[in-house]
Amino acid sequence: MKRTKIRKIFAVVLLMPLLVLGNTAHAGEPAKVIVAWYDLILELVRHTPTYSPPVASRAFAYLGVATHEAIASGRADGESLAGQINGLTALPRRESGKAYDDAVVVYAAVSLTTQNFFGNTGPTGERAMKAMLRKQEKELFQGVAPDVIERSKAYGAVIAGHVLSWSESDGGAVIENMGFPLQYDLIEGKSHWVPTSAIQQQQAPLLPNWGKNRTFAMPSRSSCPLPPPPEYSEEPTSQFYLEAKDVYDTSKSLTEEQEVIARFWSDDPMMSPTPPGHWIYIALRLLEDERADAARAADVLARLGIAIADGFIGCWDSKYQYDLLRPITYIRRTMDPKWNTLLITPPFPEYPSGHSSQSGAAEVVMASLFGESFAFVDATHERDGIKPRKFASFRAAAEEAAISRLYGGIHFRAAIERGLEQGRCIGKHAAALKTKR
């Protein structure tokens, strides 16, 4: 396919949220402003090179906080997250007795935060953001008094500035070399991670210090610790060997349905909105279905973003604590030197599964907000030609997301099951946040 054709396709994809926005977002409807920006953000994540899953989760957390603070500041029952999440100090309040337009406030807060987080996206992404700004200003400013517009924009900018200033000290603000350290000493020993890719950049693992980042709702990175993985052994009767044999045997007898599940949840960077974006997409469509107001939308997106971001911090802390090798390394060493995986093995340690940790966290938050037995359809990848899947609950979706990594050949069962446990522990902290008085 010619490069010019690819650019045209990318432009159409990125502008799709804008086309929808023209028919849905009007002054006084801040919830639709929120959804429109988040839909665009999902496309920016897909096409911004530094946006690996942990980096994407961080952006969603800060965007969620900025969105919540913009809406909560104008409600009598709104409760700020300042003092509840780590390091967030009290935000300036709206001027008493002055009129504000909530749609304009949230527009300014979210747009400025988005432009900051995606300042390194490509030219098409930049054009898409500028087009969104022009479109929303035309829709939102119509019929609103000039002084109210300026006051609302200025206050939204204050919120964005406060949140962005807070974000700079968390340890994850600067991503160099797409997250792969230029110097890294591998740990010696058969049980430890070794590169699984021939790509030169990936001879070091992704974001080895991410687990040291400041958390959001979780008190610390080690608040939901995991026991060690099964002890490394090459004895055919050992638990470690049997877990590897499970991965190997599953790959050899994979059903069509299992392959569908593996690919549905793969969510590879640059080819999808990433695993965090997958859960955000689910939330956006459910909010649209229930015609949620801005307070509800902001609450859901803030809690979910925070839970997923903390999920990756906790997971990465454990990954680099145990530094466990991947199934492909062990299986080729002990069972079948020509064996390969269905999915590409990610370039970082195995234990626990990131899909499992973040999905367990998302499950807890979503169940707390929508209900334990809430059934839904997940159409995240429908536009890419992948059929939607139906789930009886968020727990069922999280468990499928987790086991998909076994089907893909990239995780042992212990990493999957314990990752879910870790994520559910982490998610409880986000679910416990108070967003209303």
Image: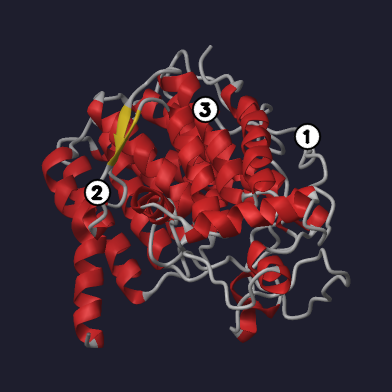
> For the residue marked with disc 1, what is the amino acid?
Ser
Q: Quadrant of residue 232?
A: bottom right
> For the residue marked with disc 2, what is the amino acid?
Lys
Q: Residues within 10 Å of mark 2 (few under 14, many from 20)?
A: some
Instruction: Name the residue nearer the viewer: 131 or 99.
Output: 131
**Left or right, 375 with reference to 398:** left
The residue that disc 1 covers is 223
Give the label on residue 387, or none: 2
In percent of width and height, residue 10 lies at 25, 70
Q: Is residue 150 above or below residue 6?
A: above
* Picture residue at 71% right of the left edge, 36% below the top: 86
Instruction: Name the residue nearer the viewer: 12 or 185.
Output: 185
Q: Quadrant of residue 254?
A: bottom left
Q: Is residue 435 above or below residue 143?
A: above
Instruction: Name the residue nearer the viewer: 83 or 200.
Output: 200
Distance from Cα at disc 3 to Cα at disc 1: 17 Å
At mark 3, the secondary structure is helix
**Residue at the right extreme?**
188
Q: Is residue 153 above or below residue 411?
A: above
> For the residue marked with disc 3, what is the amino acid?
Val
The residue that disc 3 covers is 365
Q: Is residue 199 above or below residue 123?
A: below
In percent of width and height, residue 299 lies at 45, 27
At mark 1, the secondary structure is loop
Q: Is residue 211 visible?
A: no
Mark 2 vs mark 1: which is more N-terminal? Answer: 1
* Picture residue at 68% right of the left edge, 63% below the top: 326
* Picture residue at 24% right of the left edge, 25% below the top: 291
Give the label on residue 325, or none: none
Q: Quadrant of residue 263?
A: bottom left
Q: Is residue 296 visible?
A: yes
Q: Residues within 10 Å of mark 3 (few under 14, many from 20)?
A: many
